[in-house]
Image (spheres, rainbow, N blue to C red):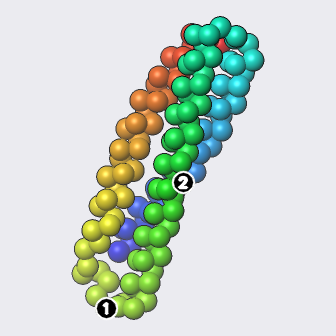
Amino acid sequence: MADLHFENDMWLNAIKFYNDELVIFENRLAEVSSRNSSVEVKAQIERFQNQFIRERDILVQLRHDIKSSENELIQYAKDKPVAVDHVYFRNHTGLEDRMNTFVTIWKELRSDYMRFLKEWM
């Protein structure tokens, strides 16, 4: 169970990092937007804005679900302190898969975004 708490903490810290990175990305996007008025660049800016909004929504949902899972772990430990280390928490595996999927997509988005910045900054 301690491993699950630790993993939840790691995910919550990662989510904070990704949210901070989103703020930086959005600020840079505003800079690019102010310097470029071509239709091509504006279309790419809009695409990134939409992707950033979507990723932020996913992070909000992940954070909520991780905190809910953490609360369930805490409640289970209070209710059944003896059995707590002998129970498999299926929900945690789903969260792990979702976090891994998010990280994979985020890395691709970040890489795509960096190429865009190199071209237009």
Cβ–Cβ below 8 Å for labels 2 and 1? no
Give the answer, above or below, for where 112 lies relative to 76: above
At x 32%, y 83%, the residue is 84
Which residue was labeled with disc 2? 60
Q: Position of residue 110 (x, y in %)?
A: 49, 29
Residue type at mark 2: give it.
Val
**54 and 4: which one is in front?**
54
Q: Quadrant of residue 50?
A: top right
Q: Is residue 120 left or right of residue 102?
A: right
Q: At label 1, which amino acid type do we have?
A: Val
**For the point 35% across and 74% down, which residue is it?**
1
- N-terminal of the pair, mark 2 or mark 1, is 2
Label drawn at residue 106? none
Depicted 60 relative to depicted 8: above or below: above
* Rendered image quadrant of residue 45: top right
Q: Secondary structure at mark 2?
A: helix
Kindly identify which residue carries mark 1. 82
Q: Using the numbered discs, state the Cα–Cα distance from disc 2 to disc 1 in whole angstroms.
A: 33 Å
State the quadrant of the C terminus.
Answer: top right
Query: Residue at left 54%, top 25%?
Result: 47
Relative to 100, 37 lies left or right: right
Asked if one can make out residue 117 in the rendered structure from this viewpoint, the answer is: no
- Residue 46 placement: quadrant: top right
